[in-house]
């Protein structure tokens, strides 16, 4: 007998309820977005469509442990498959499989951060990096792990180029993620997209991000120029970097971090805020308006109610505590206040501010950032009709990359560059 249960009522099943007309991957909004994000990495080999859809069909909305178990099991299985392929000399197959395992390990701990000392957070990050490094020899790109000098220590990063790219100084893209991404994900996008177009790419984890926060517990800092400038210093030591053609791209929370850096460091010729963000506190406090009055008891009550029923709120608060280096939700929300592009008028780089139709996270913020800028600037709307309407073009690395890099090539005067 056929199952007559409506799709939208099944836990973890697909549901065509997205306002843009796009099929949703889960009735849990947070799960849907993260599934779309990982599915988008299929374009550069970081996932496989059927693998992601099978996981989507097994997940239960709001089940944080189930999310980890499903993705970790798949990643572990793929690692075994990749190891066997490598032992038999099937190096390309091994590389492709390691790369998917790396992305699945990366996403597995996403909802585990209620306990910032959960050992699985560190273990999944290390497993992801190990699988990623194992994938590198079989990629169509040169990917070199680098250590970038930073305040007596170093920041981890990768330099990415398309194999066969001619030697010499190249237009260079420096990129960092935001609230929850990492440098391995950046290598896939925007790294490979830029490298295909002839750029030298430097992708890195800063404080509060990826390897840095997991291994050293260095939290985010609002004076992001103190992070980006050492990366530019490092880039300028390389023979494959053109000092006159350096671009900076920040993703998500990076949409305010990158403008903060560009306001201070004039070596940046072009800037991309994907998506545009003027004030992170405005975004966070809009989700929890009880944070605005300094009433700790009311705020805690509101947060405790939200995290019991809403996956997105629970994740945002728990992850925020980890990456901002605090032990409670109230301090996390208030610690976001300095993350504002107050000096945007000092940016001199030609700037692209991206505003997505189905933004969801930063609604209204791209326009605020754009209005604060006085440099040569473009506010580019990414519509759902072109399949690029989600926050940071989740699930649309081909279509999103075209729009971003057509603009960047013109801003950097590199249309004649051949990869």
Image: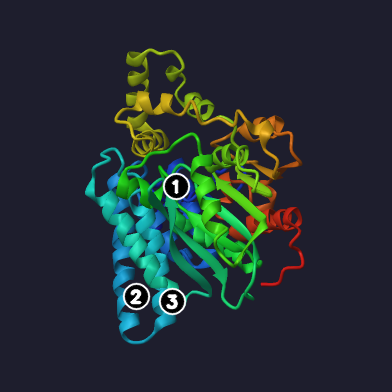
Q: Disc 1 to disc 2, how far (Cα)?
A: 30 Å
**Side of 161 where 13 appears, left or right:** left
- On the rendered image, what quadrant is the C terminus found in? bottom right
| Quarter of image, res 364 | top right
Q: Is residue 34 left or right of residue 200?
A: left
Q: What residue sits 62% from the left and 59% below the top?
A: 172
Which of pointers 2 and 3 lies earlier in the amino acid sequence?
2
Residue at mark 2 to residue at mark 3: CA–CA distance: 13 Å
Drawn side of residue 65 relative to residue 265, left or right: left
Of the numbered discs 1 and 2, the one sitting upstream in the chain is 2
Residue labelled with disc 3: 137
Provide residue 380's location: percent of width, then percent of height: 71, 44
**Helix, strand or loop status at disc 3:** helix
Q: What residue would you read off at disc 2?
A: 82
Position in image of residue 294 (x %, y %): 40, 13
Camera-near label (3 vs 1) is 1
Total numbered circles: 3
Q: Quadrant of the N terminus?
A: bottom left
Name the residue that disc number 1 marks.
Answer: 206
Q: State if disc 2 and disc 1 touch (CB < 8 Å).
A: no
Q: Estimate the x, y position of residue 306 in percent, counting from the top left.
A: 37, 27
């Amino acid at each position: 007998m056929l199952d007559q249960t409506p799709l939208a009522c099944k836990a973890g099943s697909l549901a065509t309820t997205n306002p843009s007309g796009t099929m949703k991957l889960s009735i849990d909004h947070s799960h849907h977005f993260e599934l779309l994000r990982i599915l988008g990495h299929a374009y550069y080999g970081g996932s496989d469509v059927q693998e992601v859809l099978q996981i989507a069909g097994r997940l239960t909305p709001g089940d944080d442990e189930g999310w980890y178990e499903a993705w970790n099991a798949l990643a572990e299985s793929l690692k075994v498959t990749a190891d066997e392929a490598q032992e038999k000399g099937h190096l390309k197959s091994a590389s492709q499989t390691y790369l998917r395992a790396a992305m699945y390990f990366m996403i597995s701990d996403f909802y585990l951060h209620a306990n910032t000392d959960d050992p699985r957070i560190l273990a999944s990050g290390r497993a992801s990096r190990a699988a990623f490094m194992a994938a590198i020899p079989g990629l169509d790109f040169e990917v070199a792990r680098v250590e970038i000098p930073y305040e007596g220590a170093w920041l981890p990063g990768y330099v990415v180029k398309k194999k066969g790219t001619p030697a010499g100084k190249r237009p260079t893209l420096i990129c960092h993620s935001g609230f929850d991404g990492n440098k391995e994900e950046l290598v896939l996008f925007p790294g490979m997209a830029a490298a295909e177009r002839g750029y030298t790419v430097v992708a890195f984890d800063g404080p509060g991000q990826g390897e840095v926060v997991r291994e050293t517990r260095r939290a985010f800092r609002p004076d992001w120029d103190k992070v980006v400038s050492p990366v530019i210093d490092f880039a300028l030591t390389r023979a494959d970097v053109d000092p006159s053609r350096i671009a900076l791209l920040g993703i998500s929370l990076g949409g305010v971090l990158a403008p903060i850096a560009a306001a201070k460091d004039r070596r940046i010729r072009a800037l991309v805020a994907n998506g545009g963000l003027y004030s992170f506190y405005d975004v966070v406090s809009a989700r929890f308006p009880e944070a605005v009055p300094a009433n700790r008891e009311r705020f805690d009550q509101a947060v405790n109610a939200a995290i019991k029923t809403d996956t997105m709120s629970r994740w945002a608060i728990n992850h925020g505590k980890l990456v901002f280096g605090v032990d409670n939700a109230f301090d996390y929300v208030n610690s976001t206040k300095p993350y504002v592009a107050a000096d945007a008028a000092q940016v001199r780089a030609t700037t692209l501010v991206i505003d997505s139709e189905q933004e969801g996270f930063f609604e209204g913020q791209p326009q605020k950032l754009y209005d604060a800028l006085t440099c040569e600037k473009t506010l580019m709307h990414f519509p759902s009709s072109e399949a690029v309407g989600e926050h940071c073009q989740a699930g649309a690395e081909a279509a999103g990359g075209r729009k971003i890099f057509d603009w960047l090539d013109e801003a950097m005067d590199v249309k004649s560059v051949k990869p």
